[in-house]
Image (cartoon, helix red, strand yellow):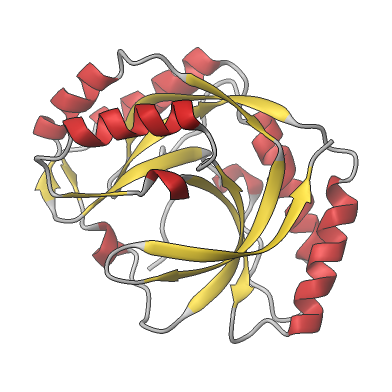
């Protein structure tokens, strides 16, 4: 089953933090229930895939805010994301069993060339919102993230055996902190999340992009880094 972008519509501005946050919250608060993430996004045992990631496990301020939110939500059937693995998924490259090693190396080389003129940029992470399957932070602005995705997609679109590149308009930048572990009414969770939205957003700097090999075990995602591309 193909997942649809959430929120269904993009914000009116990709750079205005207030508009992005309003759009995220309006979409999340319109839900009547959350679904079991592990059922709506099945992952066959033993499989793994390559993805481009932004990682945030190094940011102590973000980890502290994420921990505070997870603690406040611990009474609900949610599976928290380990703060050292906080991340943003940018783009799928392809399955571990289907991407030839020489193709992967070429993708990395292409991506290095595509990002060689891209500068580091700042994101404001927060406040908290969510989707049908997860609790997650809004991030702003979107434009530099979507620029990365576009460059990475162009760097791999002509290579054989890779996953189709999703249209850029389907991207909804966010950072998840907990996955829904059950089908459950959203109203009690919304009440708690609404209070947590008073926490100030955290400013963080995106310094690099990572290629990871990702797999899922025991209702958790794990990965190993395969390449890191530093931004200017």
Q: Quadrant of the C terminus?
A: top right
Q: Residue at x 33, y 24 (%)?
A: 26
From the image, which quarter does the N terminus lie in? bottom left
Q: Which x, y percent locates residue 165?
A: 66, 61
Is 49 left, or right, of 210 in this rendering? left
Which image quarter: residue 23?
Answer: top left
The reply to whether residue 158 is visible in this rendering is no
Asked whether residue 202 appears in the rendered view, the answer is yes
Q: Is residue 86 above or below residue 127?
A: below
Task: Identify the residue at horizontal 41%, vertical 84% (top origin).
Answer: 46
Q: Quadrant of residue 224?
A: bottom right
Viewer-proximal residue among 222 and 9: 222
- For residue 222, side relative to residue 40 (left or right): right
User: Percent position (x, y) of residue 174?
Assistant: 48, 38
Residue at 54% x, 39% y is: 58
Where is residue 138? Give x, y as percent: 44, 29
- Residue 85 sits above or below residue 13 on the image: below
Count of numbered circles in the view: 0
The percent position of residue 24, horizontal first and vertical second, equals 40, 28
């Amino acid at each position: 089953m193909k997942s649809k972008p959430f929120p269904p519509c993009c914000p009116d501005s990709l750079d205005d933090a207030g508009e992005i946050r309003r759009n995220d919250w309006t979409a999340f608060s319109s839900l009547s229930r959350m679904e079991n993430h592990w059922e709506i996004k099945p992952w066959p045992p033993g499989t793994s895939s390559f993805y481009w990631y932004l990682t945030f496990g190094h940011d102590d301020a973000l980890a502290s805010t994420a921990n505070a939110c997870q603690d406040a939500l611990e009474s609900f059937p949610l599976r928290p994301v380990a703060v050292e693995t906080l991340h943003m998924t940018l783009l799928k490259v392809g399955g571990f069993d289907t991407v030839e090693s020489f193709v992967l190396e070429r993708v990395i080389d292409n991506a290095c060339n595509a990002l060689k003129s891209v500068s580091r940029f700042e994101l404001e992470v927060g406040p908290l919102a969510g989707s049908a399957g997860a609790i997650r932070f809004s991030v702003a602005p979107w434009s530099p993230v979507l620029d990365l995705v576009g460059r990475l997609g162009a760097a791999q679109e002509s290579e054989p055996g890779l996953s189709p590149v999703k249209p850029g308009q389907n991207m909804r930048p966010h950072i998840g902190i907990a996955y829904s572990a059950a089908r459950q009414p959203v109203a009690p969770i919304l009440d708690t999340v609404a209070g947590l939205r008073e926490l100030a957003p955290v400013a963080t700097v995106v310094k690099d992009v990572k290629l990871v090999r990702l797999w899922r075990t025991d209702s958790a995602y794990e990965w190993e880094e395969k390449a890191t591309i530093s931004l200017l």
